[in-house]
């Protein structure tokens, strides 16, 4: 079934709120997100600043102990103006360097060419030249309600997903979340037309999105951290501070995946990862940082058939 | 001038040792390295375990305050057997996971096909399947003598380079080091036929190498951390623990590069990096971790011409 | 006014819940807390495991931008049995050491002598000898409702306080919290009869408490992180991971205090702290670690009178 | 035997240098140290800036696998002028706070009253008031030659000791170091008349010292990290970045001590430490931070007699 959903309420936290829409396993949802400042496709403020979220979507039958798969069918900006910070956050640079840091924050604007898929830097404030970059529309916020009846700010992330700000969460990716509450309660928001590794400005090019996604329920499938895949990679996502800990979570989750679903033992999983693992840094800006551990599917095709252990 | 150099002594530290060979700006050196365990092209132990280094090469005219450029012309294994650990280091995984960790270290062997450029896992100890991976020969250790008359173990790294274990230091890359002592004193070693991001096993596929490189001296050019470039990227390298600090060093050095050599001001450098920066994790195993900050040259071609500031 | 309050509902998060009791500036509250597992003075489970909290107490007139002072008048266990873990959490020890780590968790019991103020280790499971330690009753959880309508698990902490697990929050201490919501909404729980630095077991000697405290409202007084004082010290509390960041928060807050309330300029505050600062580690177990920055009041008596800046 | 030793050469690294003096197990050495800037008791520069070290002292019979005990008999400044920085290092404060940070470094002077044991802040540059603090003379640098023929800057520290900047290394303390080279090669320097926790200024009150110490050799006694004791405490010292790792090293070494020398098993050592452990932060300024794990001797007197395991 396909749902067209126009959000009316936006939440600034991932929590166990009243469902905005109930959907079933396999359903597709066509909806929209506002930008990080709460501005919609008309660039009008319709929600409170700070990553207001569309949702929550209640998935019938989802219970703690299950996994929710979210297929991102299509993410695309729905207006022609995007905004980004022009200042790297001081905690990302050497402490001694800050005397040379631009003292004030500055916002710059980008003209989005929706047809050709590019963003062009608008020049009034800085003189960087004719900068035209290809769009890579991604969701900064994607996740489910956290455990223990918490409501956690959409500025941060955890095992439930959240504000992971990872540039790989684009059209074509499938993302998996552990389910902590009945119905899972999926939220999405904080679209970026483009974002570099680490979200070092504290923003991507912030913009409102049209979004199409579908959901699948994996009953009695337990995962510890969010996972993802696209046509080339399987991925695991760790969210924590410092980076070292985020990397530990992501790497450990990848080993769990290889051991449980691919039947590898410890030495086998370690050997495969040791030579083939790739890491990406989602963000080093938010209260919890995000590290993604990736493994090309072509390496997985090489391993012997194992019976699942 | 081209030097053919057969090492006789190997050092297990980066330090101000007696030069093994004196070379001039622009010279090419053809030499070899032994593996991390001190084994040569005949798989015979000729040096002490622990990343024994070829060198030091004294570059005539190099003085503190200069930069040494090292062009890696050709790195290639020179024997048919490589070895790697089969166990991820515990500090890279969640502390609570270690009860499921393989308790003992295990070494596995790889057959190297030097003609076709592949490594095949030899099977006696683990049953992973028919694993054949493409070679990506890289130097784990590359650097100059550190400041302050130090001699620092080839197990770790710093501003002088060292054991950075970054898979991007391959044939075709040029690496730049700050010069701390007269002659710079370049060392190299610890060749890996293949290594994943992070060197999470504590080894790549360890093997002896034939190496051809040339050097250039950039007089009165001061850099703070190692830099590199290849045909697609400019790169800066931060070495420190934890990862957060290594990333701070690399990012700050990239900003210095953009401001000084490309004439960008703070907001301009930040804006360009914010959307175009890429990070790679060299290693998360050694006493100092390595993070590489990368920027595609094609983005640099886009910026306005700036007079150097 | 003195309120005697018998809790009926316990929350496992710090959030904007319905007030349990409304009190006024200057009021005293006599109440009780259950232990971390939800067991009361009869050692009967009356609340859900995981630091169930007494409260919230709504303080009339408290608004965002104010500070709430909580005077801990008397904290004392109200039963004769306490429990602690007998196993240091693996993430507190070297990763390579874990092979020698006790594999299983183990709980040990302590007999509490309420009259003489001691705890005696009960011996059935471990053979450590006749261990009798002096009580130092402290609250592991103390804090107010966090901002942004969040509800955050009582397993962690932040600017709002929370599960800080600092052994200095004992009878006689006054603790200051920034107010984020109307009424401040104060919570308390997780009493420890004794706890070492760092709460390295993940528990102190967990026990239910009788608690007497009073509150004062400091209107239009803004602080960034929790502060505290007792007869000897002023203190600031940073909650974050890793320890380095918790220490940054606590140190920065102490400088703010010295500059704003004592009129010191930057160099003056830095010089005083540089030679007189003391740090204590609250916990290195919880998702956010806690570092306390302390300054003896006797050093403050030494500085010149400054007009408040 | 008692040696009076007047240093002629000072080293700025811990390394395997030519012995300055050979001493025997049990000998006492009376010597002096210059300050961090190389200034002696006449405030005359006699050595190169950057923690120049007195030594190395070669202890007859010391071999790798032994432990060297250093008893600090008497440490006392030998001149009347001390100097300290007046600016906390930026990396110790919140990154966002640095805009309010004093931009420039500033050095202030202290008048040392050697008879009454106090330091008085001299006022020309800052107006803090009449600050008179009690002396606590301690050695910032103390350690032996590191392994692997390294020579490591006296700005940092490791398993061999080094620039630990811990205020507990005062008269009356005994410090234990693992021996890595024949003769152990003991170095000392960087005296501080007073230093707060963390050495957050990057200096204590820097001054030259008269030093009296004796050495004992513990043959075939292996330790992993430096240990210490005084009349009240046993202590273990971890040196690393970040703080979390320094704390891991110190805590793990304390468990080794309790298990091996006091015969406790894992649960027993963990239980004792869990309630009685104390942490001190030596420094959070140097390349490696220092955390000290302390246990009161009175708690050790409580445990049952165990046969050594």
Image: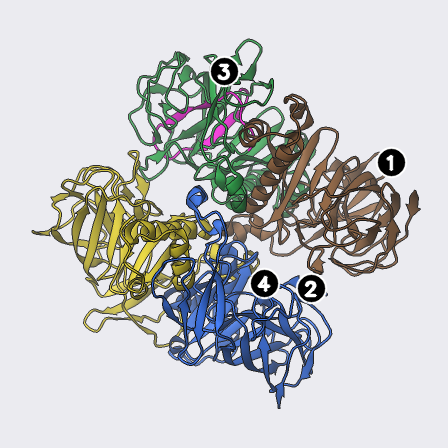
Chain colours: A blue, B yellow, C brown, D green
Closer to us: mark 3 or mark 1?
A: 3
Picture coordinates of residue D252 (x, y %)?
Answer: 54, 43
Which residue in the structure is indicated by mark 3?
A: D76
D209 is higher (above) or lower (below) than B241: above
The reply to whether dot 3 and dot 2 touch (C-beta < 8 Å) is no
**Front residue of B152 and B239:** B239
Q: Percent x, y for residue C110?
A: 78, 45
Q: Position of residue B143 (x, y in %)?
A: 27, 47
Tell me whether marks 1 and 2 sit on the same chain. no
Q: Which residues are magenta?
A: D171-197
Q: Residue at x 35, y 35 (%)?
A: D152
Chain bearing tag 4 is A
Q: Can residue A131 be seen by looking at this rendering?
A: yes
Q: Position of residue C109 (x, y in %)?
A: 76, 48
* Circle 4 or circle 1, nearest the eye: 4
Residue A151 - label: 2
Q: CA distance from mark 3 to mark 4?
A: 53 Å
Q: Is residue C82 above or below residue A158?
A: above
Q: Secondary structure at mark 2?
A: loop
Q: Which mark is residue B231?
A: none
**Do we see residue A251 in this rendering?**
no
Name the image quarter holding the N terminus of chain C: top right
Instruction: Evaluate whether label 3 is on the same chain as label 4.
Output: no
Please report, as a chain letter, where disc 1 is located: C
Q: Of discs 3 and 4, which sits in the foreground? A: 4
Disc 2 versus disc 4: distance between alpha carbons?
A: 11 Å
């Amino acid at each position: 079934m396909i749902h067209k959903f126009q959000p009316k309420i936006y939440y600034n936290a991932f929590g166990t709120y009243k469902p905005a829409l109930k959907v079933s396993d396999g359903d597709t949802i066509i909806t929209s997100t506002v930008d990080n400042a709460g501005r919609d496709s008309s660039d009008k403020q319709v929600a409170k600043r700070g990553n207001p979220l569309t949702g929550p979507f209640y998935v019938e039958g989802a219970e703690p102990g299950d996994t929710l798969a979210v297929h991102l069918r299509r993410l695309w900006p729905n207006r022609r103006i995007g905004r980004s910070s022009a200042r790297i956050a001081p905690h990302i640079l050497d402490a001694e360097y800050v005397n040379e840091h631009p003292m004030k924050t500055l916002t710059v604007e980008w003209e989005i060419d929706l047809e050709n898929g590019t963003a062009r830097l608008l020049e009034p404030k800085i003189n960087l030249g004719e900068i035209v970059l290809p769009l890579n529309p991604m969701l900064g916020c994607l996740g489910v309600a956290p455990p223990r009846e918490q409501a956690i700010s959409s500025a941060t992330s955890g095992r439930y997903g959240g504000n992971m700000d990872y540039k790989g969460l684009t059209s074509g990716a499938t993302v998996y979340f552990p389910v902590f509450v009945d119905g899972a309660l999926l939220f999405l928001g904080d679209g970026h037309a483009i974002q570099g590794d680490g979200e070092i400005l504290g923003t991507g090019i912030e913009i409102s999105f049209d979004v199409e996604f579908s959901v699948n329920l994996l009953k009695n499938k337990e995962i510890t951290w969010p996972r993802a895949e696209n046509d080339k990679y399987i991925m695991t996502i760790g969210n924590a501070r410092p980076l070292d800990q985020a990397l530990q979570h992501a790497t450990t989750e990848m080993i769990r995946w290889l051991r449980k679903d691919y039947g590898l033992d410890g030495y086998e999983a370690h050997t495969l990862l040791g030579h083939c693992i790739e890491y990406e840094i989602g963000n080093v800006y938010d209260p919890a940082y995000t590290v993604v551990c990736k493994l090309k599917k072509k390496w997985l095709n090489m391993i012997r058939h194992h019976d699942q252990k």
